[in-house]
């Protein structure tokens, strides 16, 4: 098992390492979630700067890529990832947005992605896009929310596929059910917590 680079380490405990890099003109967060016991890992959102992401994947034992949604700023590195042999997963509803870059498998609501000793549960969160998805890392306080929930409230819905009422319901019904101490790792910007964001949603 290779030693993980400490420069990208963002969060860890005895079982998990989360590595983070910020890429591209929209400063997208890309996360690698790694099992500390086996070295197996997944990458969340192959957004941009594919050379850096491929280097990260090789050093961290990434086996597959999970896309939180299909917006172009989150998928720029997908062709290079697939060419290098990494499987790319996206929801069926957002898959048409990846027609130009390609994908390999579908992610479903409540699907459990297993890698090493870790389990990550998918949560369908429509509103930003029809197929937006968040990921709960089971047994940890971590919740990866893509562009659904940010510090300060919901993601942008002023696009062809966005819907404000849907994203509010989506966050209320599927994310605010988590404890206040849950750490939210969004697709852009800094981490926040469910407790911090709960009051903002009413605003």
Image: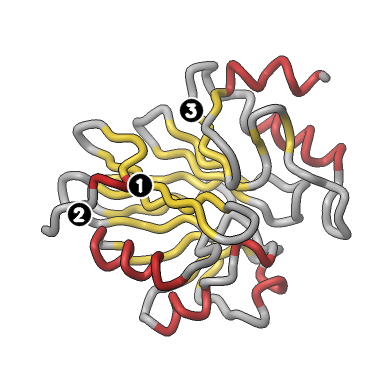
Task: Label 1: state its secondary structure.
Answer: strand
The residue beneath circle 1 is: 19
Q: What separation in Å lies between label 2 and label 3 (alpha carbons)?
A: 23 Å
Residue 150 placement: quadrant: top right
- Residue at image x 72%, y 15%? 199
User: Within 10 angstroms of label 3, few (less than 14), some, or many (20 or more) residues?
Assistant: some
Q: What separation in Å lies between label 1 and label 3 (alpha carbons)?
A: 15 Å
Residue 159 placement: quadrant: bottom right
Q: Which mark is on residue 183?
A: 3
Quick one: label 2 or label 3, which is nearer the N terminus? 2
Q: What separation in Å lies between label 1 and label 2 (alpha carbons)?
A: 13 Å
Query: Along the horizontal axis of the image, is 75 left or right of 40?
Result: right
Asked if residue 180 is positioned above or below residue 32 in the image, the reply reads: above
- Residue at image x 13%, y 59%? 2
Query: Along the horizontal axis of the image, is 76 left or right of 136?
Result: right
- The image shows residue 94 at horizontal and vertical percentages of 69, 64
- Residue at image x 41%, y 39%? 137
- Which callout, 1 or 3, points to the residue nearer the camera? 1
Instruction: State which quarter of the image contains the C terminus.
Output: top right
The residue beneath circle 2 is: 39
- The image shows residue 175 at horizontal and vertical percentages of 62, 31
- Which callout, 1 or 2, points to the residue nearer the camera? 1
Tag 1–tag 3 contact (CB < 8 Å): no
Task: Label 3: state its secondary structure.
Answer: strand
- Residue at image x 47%, y 39%? 136
Tag 2–tag 3 contact (CB < 8 Å): no
Quick one: label 1 or label 2, which is nearer the N terminus? 1
């Amino acid at each position: 098992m290779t030693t993980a680079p400490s420069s990208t380490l963002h969060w860890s405990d005895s079982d998990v390492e989360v590595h983070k890099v910020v890429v591209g003109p929209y400063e997208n967060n890309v996360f690698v979630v790694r099992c500390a016991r086996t070295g197996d890992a997944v990458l969340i959102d192959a957004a941009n700067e594919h050379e850096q992401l491929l280097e990260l994947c090789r050093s961290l034992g990434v086996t597959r890529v999970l896309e939180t949604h299909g917006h172009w700023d989150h998928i720029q590195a997908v062709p290079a990832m697939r060419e290098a042999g990494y499987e790319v997963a996206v929801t069926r509803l957002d898959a048409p947005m990846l027609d130009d870059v390609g994908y390999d498998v579908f992610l479903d609501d409540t699907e459990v992605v297993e890698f090493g000793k870790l389990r990550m549960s998918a949560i369908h969160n429509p509103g930003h896009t029809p197929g937006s998805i968040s990921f709960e890392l089971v047994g940890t306080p971590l919740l990866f929310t893509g562009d659904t929930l940010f510090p300060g409230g919901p993601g942008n819905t002023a696009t062809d596929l966005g819907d404000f009422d849907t994203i509010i319901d989506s966050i209320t019904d599927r994310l605010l059910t988590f404890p206040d101490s849950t750490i939210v790792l969004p697709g852009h910007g800094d981490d926040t917590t469910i407790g911090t964001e709960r009051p903002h949603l009413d605003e």
